[in-house]
Amino acid sequence: MTSPHGTTVEEAAGPPARTDGGRTAAWPGQESGREPVEGREEEAAGTPVRTLYCLAHAGGSALPYARWSAALPPGVRVEPLELPGHGSRLREPLLTDLEAAVAEVLERVRPEEGPFALFGHSFGALLGFEAARRLSARGTPPAALLAAGRNGPGEPLSHRPLHTLPDDRFVAAVHRMGGLPDILMEQPEVLRMYLPALRCDLRLVETYVRAPGPPLDVPVAAFGGRGDVLTDPAGLLAWQKETSGPFQLALLPGGHFFVTGPPFLRALCAALTGAAAPAAPAP
């Protein structure tokens, strides 16, 4: 089905989540009478998202996300969160501990500057989730968590661990799963510089275990590519377990890097608009 913003939204596994006697609930901002997305109705943030902090996939740079600014709702500022050893910070030592990576994110987020959302792609979704947990514990939660290209944090690993493989097998395996852009495979020298960060981040992903703790009390949106072998609809739907607030799931055209396409940007805009608007009344 299609949302008012043109975002393709599909039922991933079974019927939409139901609360309050079986009523289908909506993402905040969705008007009564419009087609529902998968989700639950809760109290909305009620304030516009001013900053979208963006976290990249394993080994990737967050700087390209700055290009989204022109496509996002007015007033939303994109803030790429570049990790040490990645992209423009390539010469800095890599962070080999997940807690250190999360601490880096927390140091860069500025809740005092107004309502913000966290976006993460793949490895970035995991970082965003852990950062959201800690920010919530501090009393400064994000207005929304937007997770793309990653099954829920409590789900089993989607593939056999790869981070210990020798370089040639490592590259071949990651590329086969769609985890390496074709353009990198065509540039061996650039790929060689990219490998240490990719291997480091994949080790963090492949050894990650979700620590016990309550669900978030913020809206969560999950996005997946229909051709992405690193996710599956049920695994993406598992993000719903991570929030007591509203939830939506969008399945979109493309593989692991579906976030580069216009359908994803439309879905992202819809999620940001929803996170900023008042909740719809129950039908």
Image: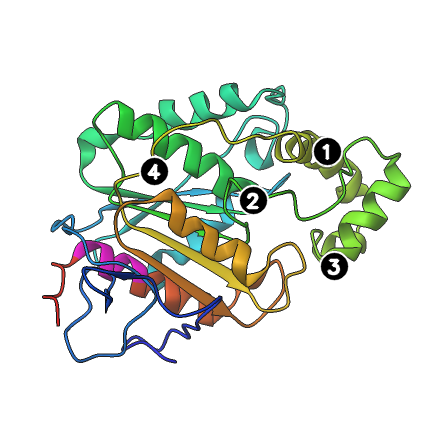
| Dot 1 amino acid type | Arg
Q: Name the outermost residue toward the front.
A: 21
Q: Which of 135/183 is in front?
A: 135
Closer mark to the observer between disc 1 and disc 4: 4
Q: Which residue is the site of mark 3?
A: 182
Closer mark to the observer between disc 2 and disc 1: 2
Q: Is residue 222 magenta?
A: no
- Whether residues under marks 2 and 1 lie with C-beta atoms below 8 angstroms apart, the answer is no
- Residue 81 visible in the displayed image: no
Where residue 102 appears, as percent x and y from the top left, is: 46, 26
Where residue 7 appears, as percent x and y from the top left, is: 38, 73
Q: Residue at x 34, y 38 (%)?
A: 215
Rendering quarter of residue 155? top right
Q: Which of 74/283 is in front?
A: 283
Give the numbered dot on residue 155: 2
Q: Is residue 258 left or right of residue 71?
A: right
Magenta span = 271-276
Q: Residue at x 62, y 43 (%)?
A: 156
Secondary structure at numbered mark 2: loop
Rendering quarter of residue 10? bottom left
| Dot 3 amino acid type | Asp
Secondary structure at numbered mark 4: loop
Q: Residue at x 76, y 48 (%)?
A: 174
Q: Which residue is the site of mark 1?
A: 199
Q: Is residue 20 above or below residue 51?
A: below
